[in-house]
Image: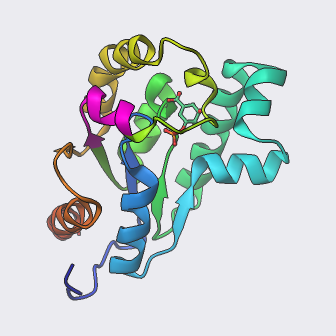
Amino acid sequence: MQAPERLETYGHPIILIGLMGCGKTTVGKALSVLTGMPLLDTDAIIEEHSGRSIADIFQSFGEAHFRSMETALLRYLKQHPTPAIISTGGGIVVRAENRKLLHRLGFTVWLDVEVPALLARLARSTTRPLLNRPDRQEVLERLEAERRPLYAETANLALPSTHLDIHGAADCVYAAAKDFFALRS
Ligand code: S3P
């Protein structure tokens, strides 16, 4: 990973979207180091503000309530744009309002990883309520089929990243962000 010249985002964030396990948080951390911009994680912010884990929110209030919390957070971020790397929860694109907000917020990148690679990466994960069941493969395949068009509609860039390592993906996003913000400025 090189240390390229400073990225100018004109006060806007770079947002990472994609299915659970696609690397939003790990690539986000690498991008944060590359750009010097802080990493914000929508799941972590929701957990901090509510004082509950995502699993607890799903169990106590249901998925629809969690989606409303995501929408409220995106509305806030749209009103208070900040130069940051934003890592999102995989289902944030399910709501049409969220897709619009994400598309307009800054530079939104879909880390597109194939399901077998996701399954391998998520093998030891116990914190994702939607995957706490034996038929993980079917669940992920269904989510992938449902959400693929939603990620495509939301993203400014779709990055096939099954075969990219963390730093390779971060370098690609960085280079694309430079072009995106240069054209928008
Ligand atoms: C979800 C993905 C999770 C988290 C919640 C729901 C989803 O985030 O927001 O468990 O609907 O795909 P990650 O994508 O960071 O695992």
Instruction: Please say if 130 is above or below 168.
Output: above
Q: Position of residue 68 (x, y in %)?
A: 67, 29
Instruction: Please say if 39 is above or below 125.
Output: below
Q: Position of residue 22 (x, y in %)?
A: 36, 42
Q: Please give the count of numbered marks on the rendered protein.
A: 0
Q: Quadrant of residue 127?
A: top right
Q: Position of residue 8 (x, y in %)?
A: 30, 78
- Residue shown at 45% from the left, 14% from the top: 139
Q: Which residues are magenta?
A: 111-120
Q: Position of residue 176 (x, y in %)?
A: 17, 62
- Residue shown at 42% from the left, 82% from the top: 36
116 to the left or right of 41: left
Taking the image as drawn, is residue 30 in sight?
yes
130 to the left or right of 48: left
* Pick the front one: 178 or 79: 178
11 to the left or right of 78: left
* Pick the front one: 30 or 116: 116
Q: Quadrant of ligand 1?
A: top right
152 to the left or right of 46: left
Taking the image as drawn, is residue 13 in sight?
no
Q: Quadrant of residue 132?
A: top right
Identify the colour scheme used.
Answer: rainbow
Q: Where, quadrant-wise, is the N terminus in this rendering?
A: bottom left
Find out whether residue 89 is within the magenta segment.
no
Is the stretch drawn in magenta largely helix, strand or loop? helix
Q: Where, quadrant-wise, is the C terminus in this rendering?
A: bottom left
* Pick the front one: 169 or 127: 127
